[in-house]
Amino acid sequence: MGLAEIVRFSVSLEADLLEEFDRYCAETHFSTRSEAIRQLLRSALTAHAWEKDTGEAAATLTIVYDHHRTRLTDRLLELQHRHTDMVVATSHVHLDHDHCLEVIFLRGPAHQLRDFADQLRGLKGVHTSQLVVARTPGTP
Ligand code: NI
């Protein structure tokens, strides 16, 4: 990253909020208030951009789950059939007696792919899940 111009600005806030913020800085070992504010701003802006991202994307969702868990397989299939507009294909590996690895190939608006991944992740019996989103360069 290149050297960016540093600007100063002042912020008005309540004394007790500042006190709480200073405690936060001390507890989380930020060297200065500025460093803490920089990092908090960056993570807020990243989260915001992430949420409103409606651009088209392709993704893989990899999940490992216990197929003995009551109704889990049904729920996973149900969710995928409800979103046939997004689910392009799936690959399934029977890992061992209890566990399955599934890779679900997705395509659609990025925020919808994440919602879908969140729904699957939340199911009881899903051990791990990882969404990898790929954006084509130049897509809005
Ligand atoms: Ni299996």
Image (tube, grey):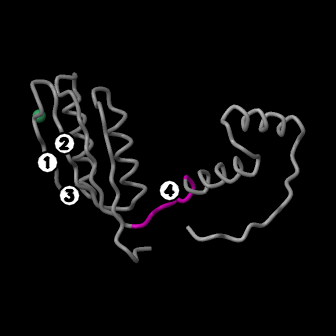
Range drawn in magenta: 47-55
Mark 2 vs mark 3: which is more N-terminal? 3
Instruction: Indicate the quadrant where residue 74 lies.
Output: top left
Q: In the structure shown, which secondary structural element does the residue marked by tag 2 occupy?
A: strand
Residue receiving disc 1: 91
The amino acid type, in three-letter code, at marker 2 is: Glu
Classify mark 1: residues with Cα within 10 Å, few (<14), some (14-19) or many (20+).
few
Residue kind at label 3, given as amino acid type: Val
Q: Position of residue 6 (x, y in %)?
A: 74, 67
Q: Which residue is mark 2?
A: 102
User: Does the CB distance between marks 2 and 4 fall below 8 Å?
Assistant: no
Label 1 – label 2 distance at C-alpha:
6 Å
Disc 4 marks which residue? 50
Assign a secondary structure to mark 3.
strand
Q: Give me the residue at 42% from left, 67% from top.
A: 55
> Which is more foreground, mark 4 or mark 3?
4
Asked if the residue under mark 1 is in contact with the one under mark 3, i.e. CB atoms within 8 Å, the reply is no
Quarter in which the C terminus is drawn: bottom left
Amino acid at dot 4: Trp
Contact between labelled residues 3 and 4, with CB atoms less than 8 Å apart: no
Please indicate whether residue 41 sits to the left or right of residue 61 in the image. Answer: right
Q: Assess mark 2: CB under 8 A from ligand 1?
A: yes
Quadrant of the displayed image that contains ligand 1: top left
Out of 40 and 49, give the one closest to the viewer.
40
Q: Decide whether residue 19 is among the magenta residues.
A: no
Magenta stretch: includes residue 51? yes
Residue that label 3 marks: 88
Residue 75: which quarter of the image?
top left
Q: Residue at x 86, y 46 (%)?
A: 13
Circle nearer the N terminus (1, 2)? 1
Amino acid type at mark 1 = Ser
